[in-house]
Amino acid sequence: MKNIVTIGGGTGHFTLLLGLKKYPVNITAVVSMADDGGSTGRLRDELGVLPPGDIRQCLTALSNSSETLRELMNYRFEKGELKGHNFGNLFLSALEKIKGRLAKGVEEAATILSVKGKVIPVSDKKMNLQIKLKNGKSIIGEKQLDHNKDVRKYGVEKIYLKPKVKANLKVLEAIKKADMIIIGPGDHYGSILPNFLVTGVSEALRNCRAKVVYNCNLTNKKGQTENFSVDDYVASINDYIGDERIDFVVFSGTKPEKKLIKKYEKREGKGSIVEFKKDILKKRNYKVIKADVLKRTQPKKNKNDIIANSRSFIRHDSDKLAKVLMMILEMDEYNNLIQEII
């Protein structure tokens, strides 16, 4: 079976894995450890654990256990001192304490949840995201991206980790063996780029043999990726990797409904829907695959999710996205088989 490594975090990573697990491939999900908002942030502060939220979503997406157990992992408490907390986050934090390391706790959780593939934290060390704004000011913490007014007012210039942290060795091994590496979708500065700041990850990507595919975001965020086009996203990711490493970009050729666009622009401003500019002066070193990968229905809003208002309601369709990615994975085999299309 082919080896696929996914890199990301958040809801976008969950969406991707939900579709991929239906195919006969070996999946390794590499997850950002920069999250410090919501239930995850409270657990980091109160218990001193690594952020469990994005790990939980990946485990749940790849789980072949009962529907009840998957619902339990995503359950949020509505009242009392646990209000807003997610059961799965508490579960993973407890396993980290029992096993001594989050990575060991995740392995135990994967067994309990009958997970297909592996879910690996990008690092075993605490990641503190530093955000430098375009006015020269620096702020600390991934949650600041969505909740600090200065981000929306001045915009993000760059992000970095302080102190630097080393990659989990299992992550580097997985990248080396991968046939395909899939980046995104997900929050650009919050879920995607922090992975490439971890020492060893970008170097491994530069040197690996795998096809690298980027699932381009559908929407932009004010102050972060304001007016970003497909090419802007690719240029930014390649810059953090340190080489023009992306081979393919999957981009939605279908637009959301006008009422959804208006609703999103009301929150994020004009230019919040990502555009593909077909005619550009610079030659692309990657192929853009436009496909119908847009989810038609809106996700239900969880009233107990304290960061629900910052989440995107325009999302990818898991099954459509996975089909396109499998096509890319097998493309070389088809090219070798088909001699001519007349």
Image: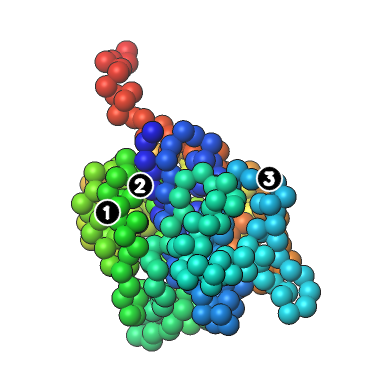
Q: Nearer the viewer, mark 3 or mark 1?
A: 3
Seen at 67% across and 71% down, the residue is 85
Give the SS element for disc 1: helix
Q: Are marks 3 and 1 in contact (CB under 8 Å)?
A: no
Give the SS element for disc 2: strand
Q: Find residue 49 and report its horizontal and vertical position in percent.
A: 51, 75
Q: Find residue 19 and report its horizontal and vertical position in percent.
A: 54, 41
Displayed quadrant of residue 57? bottom right
Give the SS element for disc 3: loop
The residue pinned by badge 2 equals 181
The residue pinned by badge 3 equals 66
How busy is the neighbourhood of tag 2: few (under 14 within 10 Å), some, or many (20 plus)?
A: many
The amino acid on which the numbered mark 2 sits, given as a three-letter code, is Ile
Seen at 43% across and 82% down, the residue is 140
Label 3 vs 2, first from the N-terminus: 3
The amino acid on which the numbered mark 3 sits, given as a three-letter code, is Ser
In what quadrant of the picture does the C terminus appear? top left
Distance Cα–Cα, label 3 vs label 2: 29 Å
The residue pinned by badge 1 equals 205
- Number of numbered markers: 3
The label number, if any, that marks residue 113 in the structure image: none
Q: Find residue 189 and report its horizontal and vertical position in percent.
A: 42, 67
Distance Cα–Cα, label 3 vs label 1: 36 Å
Q: Are marks 1 and 2 in contact (CB under 8 Å)?
A: yes
Q: Is residue 43 above or below residue 256?
A: below
The amino acid on which the numbered mark 1 sits, given as a three-letter code, is Leu
Displayed quadrant of residue 121? bottom left
